[in-house]
Amino acid sequence: MITEFTPFVSLIGGILIGLSAVMLMAFQGRVFGATGVLAGFMTPQSSSDWQWRALLLAGMVSGPLVYRVFAGEMPAIDVPVSNIALIIGGFIVGLGVTYGSGCTSGHGVCGMARLSPRSIAATVTFMIFTAITVYVVRHVLGGI
Amino acid sequence: MKHVLTYLTGLVFGVGISMSGMANPAKVINFFDVFGTWDPSLAFVMGGAVVVAFFGYRAVFKRFDSPAFEPRFTVPTSRVIDAKLIGGSAVFGIGWGIAGFCPGGALPAIGTLDPAVLTFFVALVAGIFAAKFMMQRTARRV
């Protein structure tokens, strides 16, 4: 499936993602990692800690609805893989981000911006393994 | 005010993800498919986000001694690069390549109620709990 090259809107989206990371640091003093926010939400420590995570997640989930007001449609979600791939992939992502202490937002954006050696190592690692996996799935196995 | 600003922070992230293409598995997988239907758009997402956060973090740390709603900044301080970090990140990369969704892309995408996102999300949560369970067992054994 071919997707359109969208450098401009992708850049604006990236700038907003960076801006939200800076806002969370200025307000809560935390890095904006989707994995950490979600994990902390599911295993509550204190009511005030749970509360900001719940509000943050509520804001995140309403993002597509606000996008829809301006763009006239929901953000495109084209899924070129099977349901089994979504389930296996989702489970593996959950395992990996928990052991690796972060994902694209936590390590890839916030950690790289902080020049954290751990996050740079993590980001380089997952980018390489994602690329290898996509190559194997698409060009060796012919899709799953 | 505090709650409104926290909600808005999430909203800015959610709108950013919606615009960026990070919530679209076809775009994510094509970004990595250099030898196939390559779409380099997501490099602009990462580039824009990292540059803004890099300068933004510096400005925040320079101007403020503490965050607005908390007594102090809680920033990860570990510099240890171990097998857990690298192994976990490698496993995450494999999963991301298989499904095309990452947690940061999928969480806002829940708002679309797309069945594919919900399927991925349930599996993601199961994976997180499975990892936490295994990590606790390992910790107890040591």
Image (spheres, coloured by chain):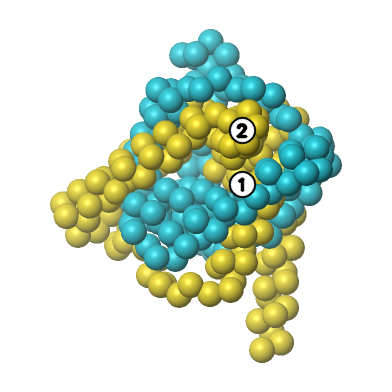
Chain colours: A cyan, B yellow
Residue hosting label 1: A131
Does residue B96 sit above or below B28 in this rendering? below
The residue type indicated by label 1 comes to Ala
Does residue A12 sit above or below B129 in this rendering? above
Secondary structure under the numbered disc 1 in the rendered image = helix
Label 1 is found on which chain of the structure? Answer: A
The outermost residue toward the left is: B63
The residue type indicated by label 2 comes to Asn
Residue hosting label 2: B30
Secondary structure under the numbered disc 2 in the rendered image = helix
Label 2 is found on which chain of the structure? Answer: B
Alpha carbon distance from label 1 to label 2: 10 Å
What is the x, y in percent for residue A48?
Answer: 46, 55
Q: Which quadrant, please, contains the N terminus of chain B?
A: top left
Does residue B14 sit above or below A54 in this rendering? above
Work out whether disc 1 and disc 2 sit on a shared chain: no
Residue A99 visible, this orientation: no
Give the residue at x 74% y 63%: B130
Give the residue at x 40% y 22%: A8
What is the x, y in percent for residue B110?
Answer: 64, 34
Give the residue at x 62% y 67%: B87
Quarter residue B12 falls in: top left
Q: Which quadrant, please, contains the C terminus of chain B?
A: bottom right
Q: Nearer the viewer, residue A131 or A93?
A: A131
Q: Nearer the viewer, residue A42 or A81?
A: A81
Q: Nearer the viewer, residue B47 or A131?
A: A131
